[in-house]
Amino acid sequence: MKRYCPTDVLALIHCLRIVQIFVYSVKWTGGLQWGITAHKKFPLVACILMPAGYTDCMDCDAKKTSVLHTIAPVWDKDSRVLVLGTMPSPASRAAGFFYMHPQNRFWKVLPALFGESLQFANNSPDRDGAIRERRAFLLRHHIALWDVLAGCDIDGASDASIRNAVPNDFTALFSGAAIRAVFCTGKTAAALWQKHCAADYGMQCRCLPSTSPANARWSLEALQGEYAAVKAAADGVSGKAGATFP
């Protein structure tokens, strides 16, 4: 059997490193797609050729879905408060409206502050009835509802996984309604508003805790205490909105 001397091994490693540098240099274009394919079909080869951590990154990106926002915003000329999420979850996209995951507490928290409760549950078979009821509630109390992003790459409903964020265009909304306060439901939504929108529209936001079931450490009562600022702003109570980014 032929034996390889150390210089032969070093030469082989050097060649592999050259290929590695070439593959890495093309970054997130065609090279990434090649890398994903190679990683799936020839994992050993891909591990040799790709830099440390690169294949892990490809695994993460391969799970992401490019999502476009297709749910129309809710607002009219009498809206005074704008409440923003990040991007509709898969459950909300399937239902065609905001915060419609069966365990999301948004539609329990907000109506309770106004002494109301909704007839239709988030997962009601009467989807159209549930949407009409929620729209009417929002407009009745001068609350506009939308999301910060028009599109992004995201893994399921994980805000932390968002990449390539593209903000919505709020020009028509701010031109057509006298919005006095902006509230974001969660830290990611607030951070994205501050990064992409705050300067353009001259409005800072107040960050509210997420009503997602993933944020279970917040009780219904604690959420109501934080979201009371939305009611105060919608009712025009001076000094209660606190629309500043924490």
Image (cartoon, rainbow, N blue to C red):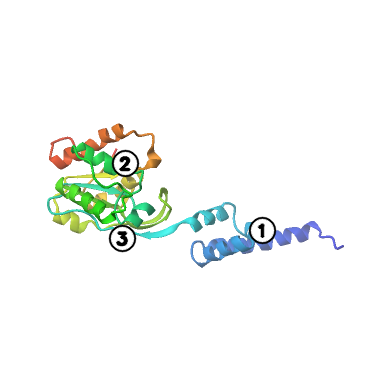
Instruction: Say the numbered circle drawn on residue 70.
Output: 3
Furthest-right residue in this view? 1
Q: Name which of mark 2 and mark 1 comes first in the sequence.
A: 1
**Cβ–Cβ below 8 Å for labels 2 and 1?**
no
Percent of width and height locating residue 237: 13, 37
Q: Is residue 73 left or right of residue 217?
A: left
For mark 2, give the secondary structure.
Answer: loop
Percent of width and height locating residue 224: 26, 35
Q: Find the distance from the CA under tag 3 to the CA under tag 1.
A: 41 Å
**Cβ–Cβ below 8 Å for labels 3 and 1?**
no
For mark 1, give the secondary structure.
Answer: helix
Q: Name which of mark 3 and mark 2 comes first in the sequence.
A: 3
Residue at 51% in and 67% down: 30
Instruction: Say the numbered circle drawn on residue 105.
Output: 2
Relative to residue 113, is residue 26 depicted above or below?
Answer: below
Residue at 13% in and 40% down: 235
For mark 3, give the secondary structure.
Answer: loop
**Cβ–Cβ below 8 Å for labels 3 and 2?**
no
Q: Is residue 133 left or right of residue 150?
A: left
Percent of width and height locating residue 203: 22, 47
Residue at 15% in and 47% down: 140
Q: How many neighbours does mark 2 have within 10 angstroms: few (below 14), some (14-19), or many (20 or more)?
A: some
Q: Nearer the viewer, residue 120 or 55?
A: 120
Q: Nearer the viewer, residue 29 or 125?
A: 125
Query: From the image, which quarter does the N terminus lie in?
Result: bottom right
Which of the two marks, 3 or 1, is nearer to us in this view? 3
Q: Amino acid at mark 2?
A: Arg
Instruction: Say the numbered circle drawn on residue 44.
Output: 1
Question: Is residue 244 at least partly visible in the picture?
Answer: no
Query: From the image, which quarter does the C terminus lie in?
Result: top left
Q: Is residue 8 left or right of residue 126?
A: right
